[in-house]
Amino acid sequence: MTDRLRALALADWFGLLVVVLVAGALLAFLQPAFLSTYNIYVLLLSFSLWVLVALAQMVIIAIGQMNLSVGAIGGLVAITFAGTMEVWGLPIPLAVLLGLVLAALCGLFNGVVTHVSGISAFIITLATLSIFKGINIGITEAQPFYAIPDAVKAFGAARLGGVPYMLVVPALAIVGVWLLFNRMVLGRQILAVGANRHAAELSGIRVGRVVVIAHVLSAVLAATAGMLAVARLQLGQPTIGDDWLILSFAAPVIGGAILAGGHVSVIGTCLGVVIVTLINNALVLLGIDPFFVQLLLGALILAAVMLNRWRERRREALA
Amino acid sequence: MGLALLIVVLVAIFATVNPGFASPFNLFSLTRVMGIDMVIGFSMMVVLVTGGLNLAVGSIGVAAVMVGGWAMQVQGVPVLPAMAMAVAFGAFLGWINGQLTVRIGVHSFIVTLATMSIFFGAMIVLTKAESFNALPGAFVDLGRLRYWGFVSGMLPAALIVGVGLWLFFNRTSLGREILAAGANLEAARLSGIRVERTIVVAHAMSGGLAALAGLMLAARNGAALPSMAGHIGMSWLLPAFLAPVLGGTLLTGGVISVVGTALGAAMVTIITNGLLQLQVGEFWVQMFLGLILLAAVLLDRLRGVMAERRRQVR
């Protein structure tokens, strides 16, 4: 029985890997420029940012909640990071630290308010989305911070062949989150709370602590994405994070995450991001209207939800 | 009716602090936005009743308006039929949401998250992100309609819609069925209500109302703009949830307040307008609205907890 379940769990990302490889081969065949060093650099750059956004949402999906404020936290940290360096002349490491601390506070707020009030995370994070975004707009008056230190700009542009330096950050994050969910007690606890909150409580897990930690982790991942976006854009743009919402749900759901909680796949989520990145890239390379991305992303979410639902029913039938 | 009292107090404060607040010009623009916000609130309210939600209100509103704008400007369809077309199209998009929710069997959150992206994407691809800004005068005049010198025609229009919704939920069997299914799905199913149908109807109504709100906004702007609800319609979400939640509609479904939603929208509009008049700076308004939403849901929750305790003590 466990073998069968394991095989199904494997199917979470195995099918996706096949899709990625076929799509990649097809693209390379249709448009040789796809495999050029520069294009691979562009692909990895998008991947670096988006995978952090996707992981930020995935951690919350794992506890069976949702975080609408991922983009707002990313944006607020981005302008704080850029602003403190430009206006206060803060050294880079301190600005990074400040950004992470601010994000942790935002996540702490989301987690504590959600847990203590018992109100759905949806409405709480809709409110905090407006608050965080509102503070961002209030401070910047919608104007970017242009004077980013050269070292940050250099980091955002540096690459080794087709590999951007900044890939190091998401790579560490992926390994960390994978270890969390596959090797650590805390990760197991997060999944247990998502699968059955009541059962988790009865088995002695401190649910509140787990929920709050998940929200803090989500915010810190979003903040990392926000700061990388500053390095990549070479400016502290207040609109950073505005268009993360759909993507943040698309990748984990494509990767087999169940929105009711308790089941997520780190590798699946990464492959989900790869698929989204490839689609984006294909539209550009093949000269198709880039606005199709929005349409395709929505369709992908629907298709993935249907597939996951079907798989869930099959799993129930087997169990 | 603490909300009505709060509104009176707010109006009194704003009017004393800033005489410009009560000027006919400001009242006209205030009531115009108020009417639009009410209809946006109604369009979310009718799905909240089912225990679901509709993230796609903004996308549907814009998509429907672009259909209406195209019909009027390019096809030369007269104003009223074109508006009817837009509302029907909005209802159709809502019907799609309802069908998907029922058939896939997942929460409407993820379905409407996907469709908000799909509807908006399709609209942008088809319109090439260009607006219709040569709309017929008869349509644009709707935005200039003015009663007694200071009330925009948008407010009575929204109130009429509100009365219609009140009658629907309180006096028709379908309306009552929707409420019953929202309160307890299984119980409603056992008592013979076709619960799937109630969900689909609620989503279709939501789509139609979103389209209506879009038309009102387009009449105000004098153009059908693809950008009028922000990126993928996101900028409608806050007003859409604020009005019903402030007005006491429960997110868990089954409880609705049409009057509360109208008052909630009125309060949001008055606060926004008052803050702008006080030169707080337009950039801080969004943060205040977020704080208000947070305070409203927390207060509501606190009231629920206190009521629960009192019951236990007895």
Image (spheres, coloured by chain):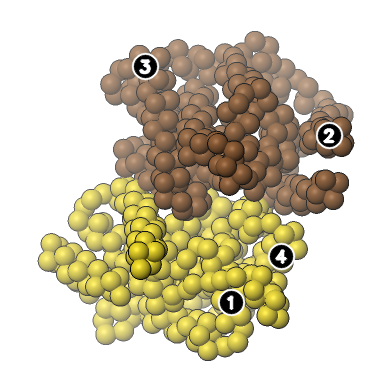
- Whichever of labels 2 and 3 marks the residue nearer the N terminus, that label is 2
Quarter of the image where one finds residue B118? bottom right
Q: Which chain is brown?
A: A
Identified by mark 2, the residue type is Thr
Location of mark 3 (residue): A94
Position of residue A152 in the picture relative to residue A245 (left or right)? left
Between the C-alphas of marks 2 and 3, the distance is 48 Å
Between the C-alphas of marks 4 and 2, the distance is 32 Å
Mark 1 against mark 3, which lies toward the viewer? 1
Identified by mark 3, the residue type is Leu
Give above or below for A152 relative to B265: above
Between the C-alphas of marks 1 and 4, the distance is 17 Å
Mark 2 against mark 3, which lies toward the viewer? 2
Badge 2: residue crowd in 10 Å (few <14, some 14–19, many ≥20) = few
Residue A2: mark: 2
- For the residues tagged 1 and 4, is the chain the same? yes
